[in-house]
Every structure is written in structure tokens, then in C-alpha cells.
Image: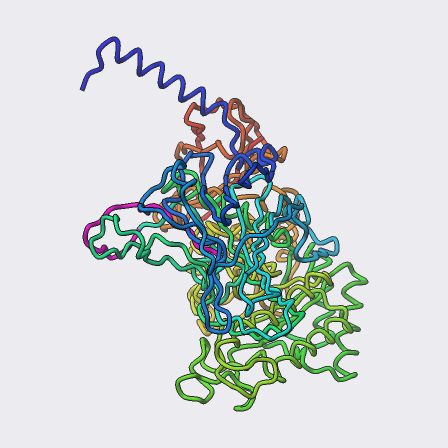
């Protein structure tokens, strides 16, 4: 279709307006400080906003969320009104807040709000408080390298108080908490139940969030998969995986029976977001006691289908909510606890610039041994490490083992141990479990260890035992064990003890998790390990910052593979050793260099020193966000780039050539998230700086040359 002259003029005016509008917008990913959280009150409403997100709550005749809006896209996220929460007390279900009388649940008009009513059977809003967000976990990094801008997330908190008019519930208060954060389109929510009454009550179940979202698609028949609204939802009650998606257990997308005008004729559209525990908690609240739920985090996204933008948003969220994830010490995994060899490894770390030694699995370390002899041995080693400026820590296994029938997790179906996530596992809420945590605390305190590598952290197992000391039965077992685990992790944060844990405990104190790899792949030939390892880095840094992940480099034989898979003797395989270090340090992802030493000859030592010196020189940009350029496929170049608008070094491009031929190409390098939008100064491996004009699509054409089976890098200012 051709545009006539008048339509062409209108089109140009519209286009210019759109460009002008886009240019006048402040992208929170580049300039988050522009957006400050505030909570405003009017006669009958309270609004939580920061210029990026808006949640509006009407207070009378009862409290309910009546608007949830993405202010960047202007998308209204609600189609109907639901209660603010729901609790089951003494086996009776009660709504917390809520407004009733809507005749349509596919959309609603603000003019309808005046006609809505409250129900006397619900908990009723009585008052509220507004305050600044306070730190939830005390973080003590002990001067370890980190890139955190703040020690905790900032913003505003709203708490609504609800009471019930019935005699049975006199003295029971429900508090609904909300937080809106500075600098990003993020809101959190959770509930508390406080018993000021005279009788014990049982909290059987709860739903801490209910939001009715519009349909994202309109299938008449039920599809195999449903599209979800344009937001990311997760909670701090997470376990059992290396990513948020693997470990989420509280986010449920349910059908809404009130939504009778939906297109799907079976009314199966999963358009009601519910945050709840999968089971329980079934807790008894005695007079004077209180319960606090997990927290749900709702991050509104901007451009549907833009994976990089979504990933950047998630990584910014983790940095804000869990600033300890920005700690990123340089460590090795030592496979022995022999005093002489441990001291030799510490000395090698001093020589090469490493910062931490981890006594690995299979090394012989036993943190559960609190004998005077054991404590004395490891305190001596820790003191030696500290005298050299090196941190020392070690490995402990919780799950994936059996203690005995009286202390193991009991399977609900069989009434016997077995059938847990890892086959057999101890119950953390048994006497053994409590004692295990106390033994680790004692060991860490009395040796001065700086790190715990906690393998098999609590993975979410339910326990049907009714004889364990710290839980009643099946329904409260998961909640109790999770709380015991996170209390321990909070203690680690407060005491400055670094935490590696192969599970998604970031929001509760974990520093680092596995990047995601198949263990037995490290027994493949060296060449395959390198390319597969780079694939792991590329794939594992979408939802994790570089400092949130570890990868692996077995210096000695691991899961078999023989000489073809092994780096030792290191001096005989310098090319492979360098390739591993270049892609790991070049991505900012620390690897578990597992073996008895870091170098075995002068040439090996020189190689390690050069890699660490380069990493430390560009450490800040190498720990910054990754933009994914091209995934490794073995056929051509692959690479990624770091970006950080807050640094002098705005970007660093890492490129790799897995082929036997030199690659010479002109690549389109995306510049938008460097915040260099006009003129860029780009140097090749730190030299030969050239000036480039940034195209209006925020790219620059960069001619590159990569040696066969080699790598190169470019610095952007």
C-alpha cells in the first residue's frame, strides 16, 4: 500500500513524535537512580509507585488492589478485583480484604468502584503504616571484592492491618506488607499473622497474593501451553534447582471460575496468579506468637519476547535484592587436607594472585568433627592462610545421604526412609539436623574459616515423621526445614562467611550457585570440555550475573576420561589450561580449578599470573552484565560482551574461534546498554584505539580477526 502525500506527512509527524518520545525516556536499566519509590495517600486510596510501576489499593469499604500498571508500557495488568490474601485458620477459610459486586471479570471500569461492597465474613482493613525499607539480612562482606552499590535494597514499605469481627478470631491480626523499590519496576508482597488472643490457633494454609490478570491469548480450545502475562514472578521460598524456573514452588497460575466471559469454552485459562505453599504450613500459633510468610516478587517487564532485556532486568533485580551475589573471590578447589600440601597451595595462591582456597569434596575435610584435635588442625591452616592474605574454606554435605531410620526423611507413601529428591536424606528438623547446623557453626567460628561450600542444601523434601523434635508431621515439615536452613544462611551472611550452594538460595544469603553443567562432561577430551564449557557460560549467564555462578575445570582426572581429558601435568597442556582460564575469567565466571596445585613449572606459573593480572586489571567490567552475541556452535566465531554504563570502561567484547582457520569478519556490536550512543573509543586488546560512530540502531561495525583455536578482546570507552 502506498501512502498519499497527506498520509505521508502524518506518518512522518507520528514517527518523529515516537522518536522524540523514545529519546526523552529514561531507561531504568541505564539510569535507575531517576526512579524513586513513593507511597501516596488520597481520601480512599493508597498508591505505590516509582515511575515504572503502579499498584493502587482502595481502602473502603474494604481494602483491595484496583490497579496494577506497567508505567513504561502503559499496560494495565488487572482485569478484576480479588482479596488481598486468604488464610485458613482452624480449618475455616477467610478472605483478607476484597470488594464484591462486579458483573464482569474480563475488565472493569473505575466508575464501577463506587458500587462495590465488602463482606462482613472477611477480615476488614483497620489501619496502615508507611516506612522506609530496612535491610532484611545483615551482610558483612569482610572486604571481599564486590560490585554492590548498596548493602540492601531501598524503597518504601506499606503495611495494611486487618481484623475480624467474630469472637472466635478476636485478637487475631493479619498484616499485609508491600514494598516498592527504588530504580526498578519491582513490587514485593507478603503477609503476617499475629495472635494477640487467648487461644492457640492453627494456620492451616494461606495465599499471600491473588491477582487477576487479563488473557494474553484467546484460544477457544485448550492449547498445550499457555502464554503468561509480561512479568516475572518468584519468591524467596525456592529450592531444588540452579535457576528460578527450576526452583519455584510458590507461584501458581490458576483458573478463575468467576471469569465466565473468557474465550476458552472450558474456562481453563490460567489467568489468576496465586502465591502459596505447595503444602501446609499447618502451624500452631500460641497466644503472643506470630507467623511471617515468604515474599513474592513481581517484576514488570518491558518488551515481550526480548530475551536480553528480560535477562538484564532479572540480573538487576538479583543485584538489588541480594547484593552479596556481587562478591566474586578468585578461588581454587584443593583435593587434599594434608597440612604441607594445603600450605603449598596457599603459597601458590599468593604467587599467582588467587584469593581463596576451598578444601574440596574428597579432600578429607569433616566439619562435623568438633573435636579439639580437628579444630586445632584447621584453625592453624586458616591462620596461616590469613597471614598470607588468603581466605580458607571448605565443603560439607547435608543431603544425598542417610543417617539412620530415626533421623532420615520419612516417605509419606511408604512410612519409611527413601523417595526424596536425592534418594535418601536426613530431616533437617530432626535432632540430628539441628545438631548438624550447630556443629557447622561451631567449626566455622572456632577455625576462622571464610567459606562454606554447602553441597545438597535443603532441597525441599517433605518428611512424614511425627517423632522428629522440630516439626509435627508432613504438612509443616517443609516450612520448618526451610526456615532452619535460611536462618543458618543468614548467620553466615552476618558473620562474613562466603556461601557456595548448588541451589537457588540467592535471596536468602547464598553467594554463588552452579552455572549448569553435566558432571560427566568433564571426563570428555579437553577440546570438547572447552567448547561445552563456553556453551555453559553463554547459556548460564542469561538469568545469572557472572558472579552468581561457578563453572568447573578438573585439573586431575574426574569421572574418568584418562589422559585425553586431564590437564595434569599442567605444563604439558598449557593451551587447554589457557583456553579454560581465558573464557572463564573473560566472562567473569569463577571456576572450580580442582586439583593439588595451580602450577607445576615456571611456564605454567607465568601463564596463571598473566591471566589473573589481566582479570584484575579489568575486573569491574568483567563482573558486569553480559550481552550475548553468538552461542558457541563449533562452526564459526562465538562470543559475548560485558556492558556497564557506570564505568569508564563501558564495554568489553570477548570473541572465540573454535575452528582451525583464521576468522576475519565485520560484526555488528550492540552498543545500547553501554550507554555510548554517539562516539565510541574502541581498542584491540588494550592498544590501537580507534573512534567509531554509533549507528542509529545503536550498533557499530567492528572488523575483527580471531586466530585459529584462539580468542581476542576489545575494550569500549
* Front one among 582 and 85: 85
> How many numbered dots are placed on residues in this image?
0
Q: Provide residue 617's location: percent of width, then percent of height.
A: 66, 43
Of 685 and 233, which appears nearest the observer? 233
User: Relative to 288, does residue 470 appear above or below in the rendering?
Assistant: below
The answer to whether residue 484 is left or right of residue 672 is right
Q: Position of residue 350 (x, y in %)?
A: 73, 58
Residue 224 in magenta stretch = yes
Q: Quadrant of the N terminus?
A: top left
Q: Which residues are magenta?
A: 209-226
Q: Quadrant of residue 362?
A: bottom right
Note whether 348 is above or below 485 in the view shown.
Answer: above
The color scheme shown is rainbow
Q: Nearer the viewer, residue 569 or 299?
A: 299
The x, y position of residue 70, in whole percent, is: 45, 38
| Closer-to-camera residue (66/273) | 66
Please give the name of the residue rendered at 45% of the width and 36% of the height, measured from the top-left corner: 705
The x, y position of residue 408, in whole percent, is 53, 85
Q: Quadrant of residue 469?
A: bottom right
Decide: is 663 above or below 392.
above
**Do we see residue 600 in this rendering?**
no
- Asked if the stretch drawn in magenta spans residue 233, the answer is no
Amino acid at each position: 500500500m502506498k501512502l498519499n502525500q497527506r498520509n505521508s506527512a502524518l506518518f512522518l509527524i507520528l514517527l518523529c513524535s515516537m522518536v522524540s518520545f523514545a529519546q526523552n525516556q529514561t531507561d531504568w536499566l541505564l539510569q535507575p537512580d531517576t526512579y524513586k519509590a513513593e507511597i501516596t495517600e488520597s481520601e480512599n486510596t493508597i498508591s505505590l509507585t516509582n515511575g515504572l510501576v503502579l499498584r493502587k489499593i482502595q481502602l473502603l469499604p474494604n481494602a483491595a488492589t484496583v490497579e496494577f500498571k506497567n508505567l513504561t508500557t502503559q499496560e494495565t495488568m488487572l482485569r478484576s478485583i480479588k482479596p488481598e490474601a486468604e488464610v485458613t485458620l482452624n480449618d475455616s477459610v477467610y478472605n483478607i480484604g476484597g470488594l464484591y459486586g462486579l458483573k464482569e471479570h474480563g475488565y472493569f471500569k473505575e466508575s464501577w468502584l463506587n458500587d462495590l461492597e465488602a463482606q462482613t465474613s472477611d477480615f476488614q482493613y483497620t489501619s496502615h503504616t508507611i516506612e522506609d525499607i530496612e535491610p532484611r539480612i545483615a551482610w558483612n562482606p569482610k572486604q571481599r571484592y564486590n560490585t554492590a552499590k548498596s548493602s540492601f535494597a531501598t524503597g518504601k514499605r506499606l503495611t495494611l492491618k486487618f481484623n475480624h469481627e467474630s469472637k472466635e478470631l478476636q485478637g487475631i491480626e493479619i498484616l499485609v506488607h508491600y514494598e516498592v523499590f527504588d530504580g526498578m519496576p519491582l513490587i514485593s508482597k507478603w503477609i503476617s499473622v499475629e495472635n494477640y488472643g487467648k487461644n492457640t490457633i492453627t494456620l492451616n494454609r494461606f495465599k499471600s497474593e491473588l491477582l487477576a490478570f487479563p488473557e494474553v491469548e484467546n484460544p477457544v480450545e485448550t492449547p498445550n501451553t499457555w502464554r503468561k502475562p509480561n512479568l516475572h514472578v518468584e519468591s524467596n521460598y525456592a529450592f531444588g534447582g540452579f535457576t528460578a524456573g527450576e526452583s519455584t514452588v510458590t507461584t501458581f497460575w490458576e483458573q478463575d471460575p468467576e471469569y465466565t466471559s473468557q474465550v476458552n469454552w472450558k474456562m481453563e485459562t490460567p489467568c489468576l496468579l496465586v502465591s502459596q505453599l505447595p503444602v501446609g504450613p499447618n502451624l500452631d500459633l500460641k497466644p503472643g506468637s506470630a507467623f511471617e510468610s515468604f515474599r513474592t516478587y513481581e517484576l514488570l517487564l518491558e518488551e515481550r519476547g526480548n530475551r536480553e532485556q528480560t535477562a538484564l532486568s532479572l540480573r538487576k533485580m538479583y543485584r538489588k535484592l541480594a547484593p552479596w551475589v556481587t562478591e566474586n573471590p578468585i578461588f581454587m578447589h584443593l583435593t587434599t587436607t594434608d597440612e604441607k600440601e594445603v600450605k603449598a597451595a596457599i603459597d601458590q595462591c599468593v604467587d599467582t594472585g588467587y584469593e581463596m582456597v576451598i578444601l574440596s569434596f574428597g579432600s578429607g575435610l569433616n566439619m562435623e568433627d568438633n573435636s579439639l584435635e580437628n579444630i586445632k588442625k584447621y584453625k592453624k591452616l586458616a591462620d596461616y592462610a590469613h597471614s598470607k592474605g588468603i581466605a580458607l574454606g571448605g565443603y560439607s554435605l547435608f543431603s544425598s545421604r542417610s543417617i539412620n531410620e530415626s533421623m532420615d526423611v520419612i516417605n509419606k507413601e511408604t512410612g519409611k526412609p527413601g523417595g526424596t529428591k536425592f534418594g535418601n536424606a536426613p530431616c533437617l528438623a530432626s535432632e540430628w539436623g539441628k545438631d548438624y547446623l550447630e556443629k557447622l557453626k561451631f567449626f566455622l567460628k572456632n577455625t576462622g574459616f571464610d567459606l562454606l561450600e554447602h553441597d545438597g542444601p535443603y532441597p525441599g523434601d517433605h518428611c512424614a515423621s511425627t517423632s522428629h523434635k522440630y516439626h509435627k508431621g508432613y504438612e509443616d515439615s517443609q516450612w520448618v526445614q526451610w526456615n532452619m536452613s535460611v536462618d543458618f544462611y543468614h548467620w553466615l551472611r552476618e558473620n562474613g562467611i562466603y556461601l557456595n550452594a548448588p541451589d537457588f538460595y540467592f535471596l536468602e544469603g547464598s553467594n554463588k550457585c552452579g552455572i549448569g553443567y553435566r558432571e560427566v562432561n568433564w571426563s570428555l577430551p579437553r577440546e570438547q570440555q572447552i567448547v561445552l564449557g563456553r556453551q555453559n557460560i553463554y547459556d548460564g549467564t542469561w538469568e545469572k550475573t557472572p558472579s552468581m555462578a561457578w563453572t568447573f575445570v578438573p585439573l586431575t582426572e574426574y569421572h574418568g576420561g584418562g589422559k585425553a581429558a586431564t590437564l595434569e601435568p599442567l605444563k604439558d597442556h598449557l593451551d587447554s589450561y589457557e583456553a579454560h582460564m581465558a573464557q572463564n575469567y573473560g566472562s567473569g565466571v569463577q571456576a572450580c580449578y580442582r586439583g593439588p596445585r595451580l602450577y607445576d613449572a615456571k611456564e605454567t606459573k607465568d601463564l596463571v599470573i598473566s591471566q589473573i593480572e589481566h582479570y584484575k586489571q579489568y575486573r569491574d567490567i568483567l563482573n558486569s552484565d553480559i550481552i550475548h552475541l553468538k552461542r558457541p556452535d563449533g562452526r564459526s566465531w562465538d562470543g559475548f560482551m560485558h556492558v556497564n554504563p557506570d564505568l569508564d570502561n563501558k564495554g568489553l567484547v570477548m570473541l572465540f574461534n573454535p575452528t582451525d582457520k583464521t576468522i576475519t569478519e565485520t560484526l555488528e556490536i550492540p552498543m545500547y546498554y553501554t550507554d555510548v550512543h554517539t562516539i565510541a573509543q574502541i581498542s584491540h586488546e588494550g592498544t590501537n584505539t580507534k573512534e567509531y560512530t554509533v549507528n542509529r540502531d545503536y550498533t557499530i561495525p567492528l572488523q575483527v580477526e580471531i586466530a585459529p583455536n584462539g580468542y581476542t578482546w576489545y575494550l569500549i570507552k
